[in-house]
Amino acid sequence: MAWVMFGSVIGSLGAAGLKAGAQRLEISVRGVVTNWRLIAGLSGYLLSTVFFIHGVKQGELSILYPMVSVGYIWGMLWSKLFFGEPITRMKIGALALILVGVALLGYGGMK
């Protein structure tokens, strides 16, 4: 479970890197290859996949895969911190529903 959660955090940082890179993207091969923010974002996604694979190898996919959605919480925090995006009541409500769903799945997986 910890591997999947850690992968979720890394993946959300990857998403922030993709956004930061996209904001500075020059549409050319050189522009993409030299865009370190974009490369960091892609690397974050790749690294998060490694953690996810390690986690699901040892656990139940039906329990662990929904835990990836916890990355949305991190993503909202990174968007506020790095890009100044607003955190609205609607976003908080949506994240609360995600957490309730993850908790119910986890509770349903208990034996």
Image (tube, rainbow, N blue to C red):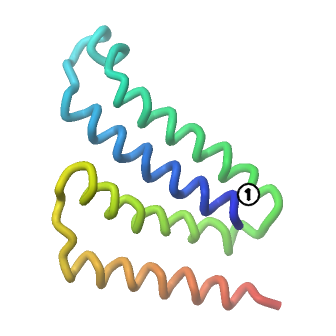
Q: Which residue is mark 1?
A: 55
Residue lying farthest front?
81
Callout 1 amino acid: Gly
Compared across the picture, whether 4 is left or right of 54 comes to left
> Which quarter of the picture shows residue 93?
bottom left
Disc 1 element: helix
**Vertical side of 52 occupied by 5: above or below:** below
Compared across the picture, whether 3 is left or right of 41 comes to right
**Vertical side of 83 occupied by 42: above or below:** above
Q: How many marks?
A: 1
- Image position, residue 79 (x, y; %): 27, 56
**Vertical side of 45 occupied by 68: above or below:** below
Residue placed at 29% from the left, 80% from the top? 92
> Which quarter of the picture shows residue 30?
top left
Compared across the picture, whether 35 is left or right of 51 comes to left
Residue lying farthest top?
30
The quarter of the image holding the N terminus is bottom right
Residue placed at 76% from the left, 69% from the top? 60
> Which quarter of the picture shows residue 97?
bottom left
The quarter of the image holding the C terminus is bottom right
- Image position, residue 51 (x, y; %): 67, 49
| 77 or 64: nearer the viewer | 77
Crowd tier of the residue under label 1, counting other residues whose Cα lies within 10 Å: few below 14, some 14–19, many 20 or above:
many
